[in-house]
Amino acid sequence: MSTAGDTQGLAPSKDNQKSAKLSLDGKDFDLPVYEGTVGPDVIDITRLYGDTGNFTYDPGFTSTASCESKITYIDGEKGLLLYRGYPIAELAENGNFLETCHLLLYGELPTKAQQEDFNERVTMHTMVHEQMTRFFTGFRRDAHPMAIMVGVVGALSAFYHDSTDINDPVQRDIAAIRMIAKMPTIAAMAYKYSVGQPFMYPRNDLDYAANFLHMCFGVPCDRYEPDSVFAEAMDNIFILHADHEQNASTSTVRLAGSSGANPFGCISAGIACLWGPAHGGANEAALRMLEEIGSADRIPEFIKRAKDKDDPFRLMGFGHRVYKNYDPRAKIMQKNCHEVLQAIGADRDPTLKVALELEKIALEDEYFVDRKLYPNIDFYSGITLRALGFPTSMFTVLFAVARTVGWIAQWKEMIEDPEQRIGRPRQLYTGPDERPYVPMKDRG
Ligand code: SDX
């Protein structure tokens, strides 16, 4: 298997394959097994249906690799997250978000010249077509900003016909740069619209995170200089949320893109999926839960509900499909959280106190320990974002701004994968067998 960053094709190397034996209806089938750079091997079942007449069955895809990728790797047992091989903590502590964008998109950390060129290209695409401002007036002022994001980002495809030919690598690259550059502008516009303030144009003299804070919290009648602690925390939040293997929203973007749909529409589909409370909507849900708990003495009541199978309540910000020890992003997010709260003199924020007490209790409770349910990134990101001044309804929007580079990098990799074809899962059908139509008069 080629190593991360190689330009060779994505097709698995066939020369070092092992094989798995399947015995079915008295016949034996050899299925090729491929090894990755790290992580679990995969059993190639592409010929299973043709050879055996059987499908596999894996709701939620807990044991299914949907693709080969060189971008991000998670080891849930070790609490490890690598972007193109680099540990997330090292990128967050030493780099910045646009450096991470270059790494995720092109496979390597940029040289100084490459970084300057990339920053310039992104900066030159931060404005949106002036007519896009009219989309906002069609929404109610109290519309959820994620609803606005789904609509307005999807509408980008109506404005950029010169970058929707997905088979042209130059247009794919322009579309990627445009998405990374314009998401903060559209997100800030959604926020401004919700608070009835005028939109703020991007400023080319500010870096990505500081510019986003300017567009959100600046006003035309005053000069806004983003607090450096806040800008650093914002940049870190973007890095931590940038990509995460084949999670639900990334898989949505890949599936939409596999039909040849334009990249803007695919990202809009990813935003819609991320909105779900089990996925990117968890930071908003986690903060609402902490506020509902209100004080440490009510925590046992909520822990009891989380364990009750008859109660749909889940502890928001806990658990993860892949991380079964600790979400490495949560550790960095917790540090960010304390720094921001200290900066605003609220390091004993009552919600943070409830969060820390809930974390302590849950990490000692056998239900959570037995099921390896640990705080994930959403547990602390909500508190941090509130401290930065964002309303709860904007939390998932910020997640979408960060995840756009992951979505577009994965979309680009899928388009360039020689093995890619339209995604079309099959099913186990348990509905009625064929039966004749019953005219209305005979239906009793
Ligand atoms: C994100 O995929 C990604 O990479 C996502 C993400 C990314 O960066 O893209 O990391 C971002 O989405 C993080 C997750 C945010 N969601 C939440 O915080 C919502 C609360 N968490 C749960 O909804 C849940 O943990 C999931 C959805 C995250 C994972 O669901 P799974 O895979 O079904 O959970 P599991 O198989 O590990 O559950 C094992 C057991 C089950 O109970 P039993 O059937 O064994 O008795 O733990 C229970 C679950 O019911 N459980 C919980 C729980 N999470 C799982 N019980 C109480 N509270 C919880 N939070």
Image (cartoon, grey):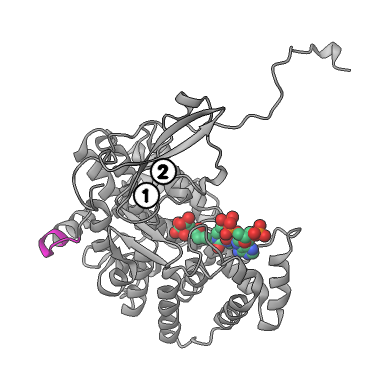
**Are discs 2 and 1 less than 8 Å apart at CB?**
yes
Query: In the rendered structure, which amino acid carries the disc numbered 2?
Result: Val
Identity of the residue drawn at 31% across and 46% down: 129
Percent across and percent down for residue 347 are 49, 86
Q: Relative to the observer, which residue lies in front, 94 or 116? A: 94
Residue 8, above or below 291: above
Which quadrant, please, contains the C terminus?
top right
Judge left or right: residue 139 versus residue 93.
Answer: right
Q: Which residue is mark 1?
A: 407
Q: Quadrant of ligand 1?
A: bottom right
On screen, residue 201 above or below 298: above
Measuring from the top left, give residue 405's x and y in whole percent. Answer: 33, 53
In the rendering, at what x and y percent does residue 143 appear? 55, 53
Q: Secondary structure at mark 2?
A: helix
- The type of residue carrying mark 1 is Trp
What's the mark number on residue 4?
A: none
Q: Does the stretch in magenta take in 102?
A: no
Q: Which residues are magenta?
A: 109-115
Name the residue located 57 percent from the left edge and 83 percent from the top edge: 353
Few, some or many residues within 10 Å of mark 2 (<14, 14–19, 20+): many
Label 2 sits on residue: 253
* Left or right position of 438 against 264: right
Disc 1 residue crowd, few under 14, some 14–19, many 20+, Cα 10 Å: many
Q: Is residue 31 visible?
A: yes
Element type at marker 1?
helix
